[in-house]
Image: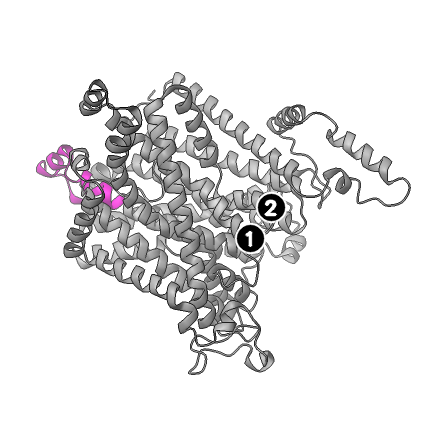
Amino acid sequence: MMNKGHRSNLGGLGELARRAWSRSLRFRAGVVIVVVMVAVAILGPFIAPYPSDGWGAVPPKAAERAGKPPGPEFLLGTDHLGRDVLSRILVGAWLALAQSLAVISIGLALGLLLGICAAYYRQAIEATINYIAEVFLALPAVILALALRMVLGQGIHVVIGSLLLTWWPWYARVAYVYARSIAEMEYITLAKLAGVPGRRILVRHIAANVLPPVLVQAITDVGSVLLEAAAINFLGLGLPPDAPDWGIIVQNGFKYVISMPWISLFPGLFILLTALGFSMLGDSLREELDPKMRRRWRLWF
Amino acid sequence: MPVSLNYLVRRVGWSIATIAGVVILSYLVLVLSPGDPAVKWAGNPRGPGAAKAIENARKELGLDQPLYLQVLNFLRMAFTGDLGISIAYKKPVSEILWRGLAATLELLALAYAIAIPLGAFIGVMASLRRGTWLDGFIQSASLVLANTPTFWLGIAIFMVLSTSGVTAYGRVDTRLALATGFRSITGLYLLDALVQLNFPVFLDVLARTFPPALAVAAYPVGVCARVTRALMADALLEGFVQSAVAWGVSRRAVVWRYAFRATLAGLVQVSGLAFAYSLVDAMVVEYVFGRDGLGRFLFDSVNTSDFRLATGLIIVVALFYVLANTLADIVQALVDPRVKL
């Protein structure tokens, strides 16, 4: 793993993806799912049969349309307010991806920065960062969402804030572990002796080598973050109850689960499928990166 | 003794420091939350006596002291198990949450009693048939299970049961409990019913806990299956397993007594970590199945803006997380003589 890690950088990641594509069926399936979902997220509002339903507007003839089972007119049925479920799912796709990708990208950047700093500077900085990471690792995202909901009120900031606070420590830890093993290698010592400035060593020699394995981990995590975001929204801690988020649509349908099961059924399937797609992608990439490395799921330590 | 005292002391100290951090953080929630807690505590008084009542409430809650004293005071209270009085329930938060935690633990325990043996068995089967269709199927199925939204799975189970006429709502049939004179002492209904030899209630509680437990079990079954498969694949190649095969030890003994035992430690550690993770799943499923667990109090605290209850919940969950992780590490060391802590 380590000797491969040294050569590979971001260009190596493309090479990795090519190898995974030719070898792994799971990788190809993951790519297809993710590409389709990204396309849906971008095109959703345009391909939705009833776009205004999708955004949460109650249609004029709500009473007539309410509670229609899936059929040719409404492919996935309508909800209790007469809104087309398919339109709501399609329009909400970007919300699902935006929430999880925002959390992962910001969390990754923050975690890398702090993790590498902790490994390189050591002592007080190391201890402080480790302690803060430890405190946030002891709190599940849903509980932090509760705290943020109490203090700040409903909104997307609750979802992104709580997930961000609970996810950056994972990346900080992974980055910290990799960076420490790299920082103790000879070429870093040589670079220091040659008078390469500290910041340059950090970026060019340590961060560049820590990035690929952490990035692969992050792809898998997009799915996990999506699941947690959906749970937070389902509990009513995050987005307002009219937003077309998939977790919220499941919540809306929950009260009518006996009479109109399709309202909750389909958005849940979309969550499952999207999370599965990212999982398959990250999983197969990781196997390609290091066939011997065991999958540790969301749990690193 | 594979666990050194030195490690234990360090670990416990680190855990206490972590919890202290969480307690301070949760106090910030209390301070920063909108609305004056003293006004709420005094019951939103109006009229001429209002200012005096609020002033008294402020004194009573200790809000007239400087912030660092308030934090220290809150820390001291939290570590003695006093989490204040719930604004909505007018009862001690620790008492409410203890009951909730018992309900949640019962659900989690049943879920893991299903998940670990099942997951381990499936994982061993997959590892013995590596590369076959069965292995492929198990791998895909566990990936799907691990990516299924638990709340959605809970709703699906709830729906299927309801349409087939089975009620799995709540923790126990109140009328049955009253009729048979069932009283809960520990908050763990299964245990209480068993101790009181109250079998109708025991069966009723079990029947109501089983469906939500299935929903919670989905994730750990997937995790355990995958971890066991990976660890077994390594263990089967180990020298001691190979030589057991060469000695003519029966296949079953080789698989279960030699190879599987070597995977136990890893399995314990992973399920310990997953156990903490499943706490949130259990809370969400409790909400779906209308059980009086931590999940219900999470919901209540938001809907009634009960900040005391919310801060208590944050502390209890963090405590649970840290305890579960620490225990998992220690049990792992006890199971596996190769691990030295």
Q: Name the residue under label 1.
A: A155
Q: Which residue is drawn at 40% across and 73% down?
A: A47
The answer to which image quadrant residue A256 occupies is bottom right
Label 1: chain letter? A
- Which residue is at 21% across, 46% downward? A13
Total tally of numbered discs in the picture: 2
- Front residue of this view, candidates B331 and A22: A22
Q: Can residue A194 be seen in this view?
A: yes
Query: Does dot 1 land on a helix, a strand or a loop?
Result: loop
Q: Are marks 1 and 2 in contact (CB under 8 Å)?
A: yes
Residue A186 percent coordinates (x, y)? 18, 22
The residue where tag 2 is placed is: A152
Mark 2 belongs to which subunit? Answer: A
Three-letter code, disc 1? Gly
In the image, the segment drawn in magenta is B228-252
Q: Where is residue B108 in the image (x, y as percent from the top left)?
A: 47, 46
- Near mark 1 (Cα within 10 A), the count class, few <14, some 14-19 or many ≥20, is some
Q: Quadrant of residue A195?
A: top left
Viewer-nearest residue: B123 or A256? A256
- Image height of B275 relative to B136, above or below: above
